[in-house]
Image (spheres, rainbow, N blue to C red):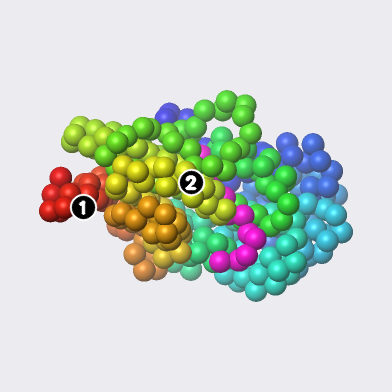
Amino acid sequence: MTERMATRDAYGKALVELGQQDDRVVVLDADLSKSTKTALFGKAFPGRFFNMGIAEQNLMGVAAGLAAAGKIPFASTFAIFATGRAWEQVRNSIGYPHLNVKIAASHAGLTVGEDGASHQALEDLALMRAIPGMTVLVPADAVETRKMVMYARKVDGPVYLRLGRPEVPVILPDDGRPYDPRVRLLREGKDVAILAIGIMVAQALEAASVLGTLGIDAAVANVSCLKPLDVPGLVNLAECGAVVTAEEHTIIGGLGSAACEALAEARPGPVLRVGVRDAFGQSGAPGELLEAYGLTPRAIVEAAQRAVAMKSPHGQS
């Protein structure tokens, strides 16, 4: 995992590629195009790029209108504004009529860093999951981001695409295959299944290596499509009897919640959640914040050890 690239950078490049393939693709931004990387699309296709200013509600309303007219809008801004400030417009103007708008939200999670709690979207997945018909995608790296952008264009309806600010390791092979929304097994294991999303996929792989030295055989799966969720894939992984989820998001309403809801109905068993525990973020370097809020390989290792212990009738492994 030596190559690194921010998913927002991969998004900007993929948009240009997509724009060359389909002239129905248009891009809207909320005066953040240098940060969201949509400036690349604006330079390549100035007639199909619209800076709506710092007015996210209007951004979503215009995107809805363009979709109703047959365009495929990619509405881009920071995640906190796309899902917080403009939630009513996303719900009523895009979700309710099931319009073909792709919402690309960058700077999600704690890794916004020094911008502080006001700019850290820790609840965005919960907000978007709750909207009926909304597809929710979270790439693990730059390779998956490009594939998701191409996939999003083909989805008939609204899509939420969550992107990050800092560079992250490239962990998935660029194999030329299209994006597959099913749960993807990255490492086999029989003792515990670690379900990860976004930047936590790399953390989960590190944790599984550590667990191996401790005598625990851990599977790692990339759950990049949070909605619609691949329930059969999750149930299959849960057959090992213990599950840990890992996400850069509050444990309320995100991957941990989705896994608990699905498995409680189909394959009950211990599910321990690694994520932000009902708290706001704070200002700090991304690495420091991940450490402070327990979003680390060490935290995943400890959760996996507890989950394995819970498989025993006596609470011991």
Q: Main secondary structure of the magenta part?
A: loop
Mark 2: few, some, or many residues within 10 Å (few <14, many ≥20)? some
Residue 137 lies in the magenta-colored region: yes
Where is residue 152 shown, x and y percent of the image?
A: 67, 47
Q: Nearer the viewer, residue 211 or 183?
A: 183
Q: Which residue is mark 1?
A: 310
Identified at 29% across, 55% down, the residue is 270
Residue 158 lies in the magenta-colored region: no
Q: In the image, what residue type sits under mark 2? A: Pro
Q: Is residue 3 left or right of residue 228?
A: left
Q: Secondary structure at mark 2?
A: helix
In the rendered structure, which segment of residues is drawn in magenta?
A: 130-141
Determine the image quadrant of residue 43: top right
Where is residue 22 shown, x and y percent of the image?
A: 81, 41
Q: In the image, what residue type sits under mark 1? A: Met
Q: Which disc, if any, is residue 242?
A: none
